[in-house]
Image: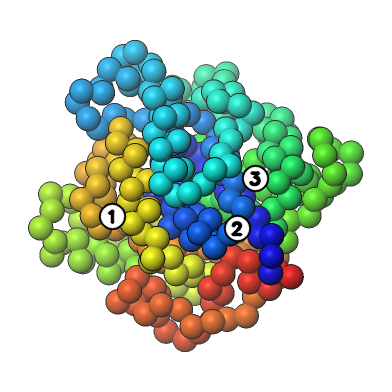
Amino acid sequence: MTDRRLLLVHAHPDDESIGTGATMAKYVAEGAHVTLVTCTLGEEGEVIPADLAHLAADHDDTLGQYRIGELAAACQALGVEDHRFLGGPGRWRDSGMMGVASNDRPNAFWQADLDEAAGELVKVIREVRPQVLVTYDQNGFYGHPDHIQAHRVARRAFELAAAPGFGEGEPWQIAKFYHTAVARSVMSRTAEALREADVTFIAEDVDDVPFGSHDREITTEVDARSWVGNKLEAMRAHATQITVDAPWFALSNNIGQEALGVEHFILASGVPGPAMPGPPAESGGIGGPADRENDLFSGIH
């Protein structure tokens, strides 16, 4: 298939690199047009480097502007040239974690009018005309309000983009809509490997983590191990948010995770492509029988 076009919708700068960085770099390298839409500037993020602590929301409140530069550097590392902020930089503000006061700001993304925000994404969809759209599941992967809202906005835009008379541009039907995912079996293996690694990051008990998908739920494994170096470089660009000790990284909570080169997805809408052999478990795959796609564009002609 030629002229492949992939659109990813993420909540904050750094989400793209952590969850889908290797996949993005792979498809760019293979000639696909990859578009990233980021919904906020990540103004409420916790700042890791002490010398940049003044950027935080409870000090200078300039973190969002700083993170624009971090995201630009990360996109360069991934090879992504088409990046947009939903509605323009700063149109909607980072809402912070669930239940905090910043959720209630009138300009918080959590408070965004769904059709208004989806309308901004529809403009991008009708311009770019992607065959594939990727975002989080209904729980925003781990329950962050901006991730949940990103899912709602992307889902609404997915529906509206094909409807005549809504928004700008010609109607466009996206063939496949995916949710990001991480298999719990992979989480367990990486946690055990982290416990044996000589790093200061904490190994979390996977049984207590309220996210992750059962292996049977994963429909698609993208083997992008050749681009994990690009992913790590992109994560290093987000220095206010991520500490990297390859192949491990941690956010401000110092809980270690592995920068995975095999990234997982769940097909939420569209026709699945043929099942193909996946990478073995020791290489970051789920392993087992060949009953998953290995390409987000699989089956699209």
Label 3 and label 2: CA atoms lie apart by 21 Å
| Disc with the residue nearer the chain's start (1 vs 3) | 3
**Amino acid on which disc 3 is placed:** Ala
Residue furthest top as drawn: 60
* Residue that badge 1 annotates: 257
**Amino acid on which disc 1 is placed:** Gln
Residue depicted at x 42% and y 84%: 288
* Residue that badge 2 annotates: 32
Q: Is residue 187 left or right of residue 149?
A: left
Residue depicted at x 32% and y 20%: 55
* Residue that badge 3 annotates: 154
Question: Horizontal and vertical percent for residue 144?
Answer: 46, 40
Question: Horizontal and vertical percent for residue 54?
Answer: 27, 17
Q: Within 10 Å of the Cα at label 1, are there few (<14), some (14-19), or many (20+) other Cα atoms? A: many
| Disc with the residue nearer the chain's start (3 vs 2) | 2
Can you say whether 135 is above or below 90 in the image?
below
Label 2 and label 1: CA atoms lie apart by 28 Å
Q: Is residue 187 left or right of residue 216?
A: left
Please state which of residues 92 and 276 is positioned toward the viewer in this rendering: 276
Residue depicted at x 68% and y 73%: 299
Q: Is residue 199 left or right of residue 138?
A: left
Residue furthest bottom as drawn: 289
Image quadrant in which you'd find residue 227: bottom left
Q: Within 10 Å of the Cα at label 2, are there few (<14), some (14-19), or many (20+) other Cα atoms? A: some
- Between tags 2 and 1, which lies in front? 2
What sort of colour scheme is used for the picture?
rainbow
**Amino acid on which disc 2 is placed:** Ala
Q: Is residue 150 visible?
A: no
Residue furthest right as drawn: 165
Q: Within 10 Å of the Cα at label 3, are there few (<14), some (14-19), or many (20+) other Cα atoms? A: many
